[in-house]
Amino acid sequence: MVVVGNVSSSKLAKTKMAKSVLDAGWFMLKTPLSYKAKGQEVEFLEVNEAYSTQSCSCCGSIPDSSPKGRAGLGVRDWVCSDCGAQHDRDINAARNILNLGFGCKAPVDGIPAL
């Protein structure tokens, strides 16, 4: 199973990160990834990644301590004020996207590192 977030590269290209987004070719990554997954008979899912960095992958809440908006882009590590779990912003988002791919909101146990 391959699960990706629905990153809108066209919307990100209109921000201050335009050069980085266009250089990375995010849109072009999904097309061959989908093609290769289907060729190997692997399920390919694109999920809505809204709030994936803000919601806690352990308890599922969106606490006040999570990074929010453009001001929160510089916050890389945060601690959930509801359950006390410490998160790296990117790993937390990856776990939440993976949870959505499996069709659950509960945290996935046993992920050593992403």
Image: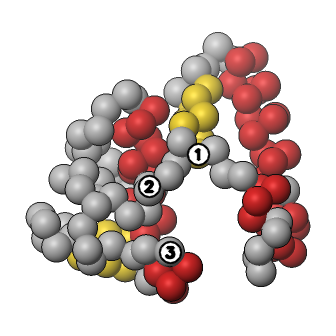
Front residue of 33 and 74: 74
Front residue of 112 and 53: 53
Q: Is there any visible trace of residue 85 in the rendered image?
A: yes
Query: Which numbered disc, 3 or 2, marks the residue closer to the eye?
Result: 3
Query: Residue 30: image x %, image y %?
Result: 75, 40
* Residue 51 placement, left or right of 105: right
Quadrant of the rendered structure where residue 114 is?
bottom left
Residue at the location (52% across, 48% down)? 49
For mark 1, what is the residue? 5
Compare marks 1 and 2 and give the one earlier in the sequence: 1
Please tell me how crowded label 2 is: few (under 14), some (14-19), or many (20+) other residues with Cα within 10 Å.
many
Label 2 SS: loop
Front residue of 6 and 43: 6
Quadrant of the rendered structure where residue 101 is?
top left
Please tell me how crowded label 3 is: few (under 14), some (14-19), or many (20+) other residues with Cα within 10 Å.
few
Residue 76's place in the image compared with 11, above or below, is below
Q: Is there any visible trace of residue 91 in the rendered image?
A: no
Please tell me how crowded label 1 is: few (under 14), some (14-19), or many (20+) other residues with Cα within 10 Å.
many
For mark 3, what is the residue? 69
The amino acid type of the residue labelled 1 equals Gly
Query: Residue 98: image x %, image y %?
Result: 43, 41
For mark 2, what is the residue? 52
Residue 29's place in the image compared with 34, above or below, is below
